[in-house]
Amino acid sequence: MHAAAQSLRPIYAYHTRKISELFGLMSASELFFQPYGNVNHLVWELGHLMSVRNTLIKLLNPEEKLHLFPNERGLFGIGSKLEAPENYPTSDLLVEAFKIRGARVDQLLETTTEARWGDPSPYPVPSMEPTVGGQLFGFMLHERMHLGEMVVLRNIIVKNRETIFA
C-alpha cells in the first residue's frame, strides 16, 4: 500500500458523497441552468468528472475494461460543446456511474504500490506531474475545482429559484 494513494481515498469519497447530495437537491430544469447563457451546466460538470474518473481507473490499472456512455467523450471531454438537454444521459444515470467509477478508483487506490505511483503516466497533461501518482493528485485537485464550481452553481440556483425558474 502506498501512503499517498491511501490519503486520496477519503478525498475522492468525499467528492462522491457531496456531488451525489447536490444532485438530489436539483430539479430537472435547474440541472441545465447556465448563468450568462454560456457557463457549463451541472449535468456537464458531473459528466465531465464521471468521464475523468475513467482516466483515473486507467492510470491505476491500464488493463481495465471501461464502461462508456454513448458519445461520452463528445459530450463531456475536453473541448466538448454544450448540447441540448435531451442529448445527455439522465442525471440519475450519471450520478450512479460516478459512484461506481469512484468505488473502483477506491479499490484500485487501496492496492496501489510504490512502483505504480512512480510510473510514468501514459497521458500527457501539461499542468500535471508526468507520473501516475502526480496525476492522481492532480486529478483530485481538478475534481475539487469542479465540485467548487458546482457548489457555486447550486448556490446561484437555490438563492434565485423564484426569479429564475418562476
Image (cartoon, grey):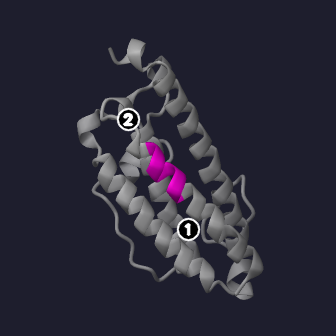
Say which amino acid is labelled 1. Answer: Leu
Q: Name the N-terminal-most of marks 1 and 2.
A: 2
Magenta range is 16-22
Q: Secondary structure at mark 2?
A: helix
Q: Which residue is mark 2?
A: 31
> Is residue 77 in sight in this rendering?
no
| C-alpha gap between disc 1 and disc 2 | 25 Å
Residue at image point 61% right, 78% down: 109
Residue at image point 64% right, 45% down: 145
Q: Is residue 138 above or below residue 81?
A: below
Q: Which mark is residue 56?
A: 1
Closer to the camera, 97 or 71? 97
- Left or right of 5 on screen, residue 91: left
Residue 163 in which image quadrant: top left
- The main secondary structure of the magenta stretch is helix
- The C terminus, quarter of image: top left
Q: Is residue 144 above or below residue 7?
A: above
Q: Residue furthest left?
A: 86
- The N terminus, quarter of image: bottom right
| Magenta stretch contains residue 93 | no
> Is residue 70 in sight in this rendering?
yes
Residue 23 in which image quadrant: top left
Residue at image point 28% right, 35% down: 85
Q: Secondary structure at mark 1?
A: helix
| Magenta stretch contains residue 19 | yes
Residue 78 percent coordinates (x, y): 51, 47
Residue 129 in which image quadrant: bottom right
Q: Residues within 10 Å of mark 2 (few under 14, many from 20)?
A: many
Residue 150 percent coordinates (x, y): 53, 39
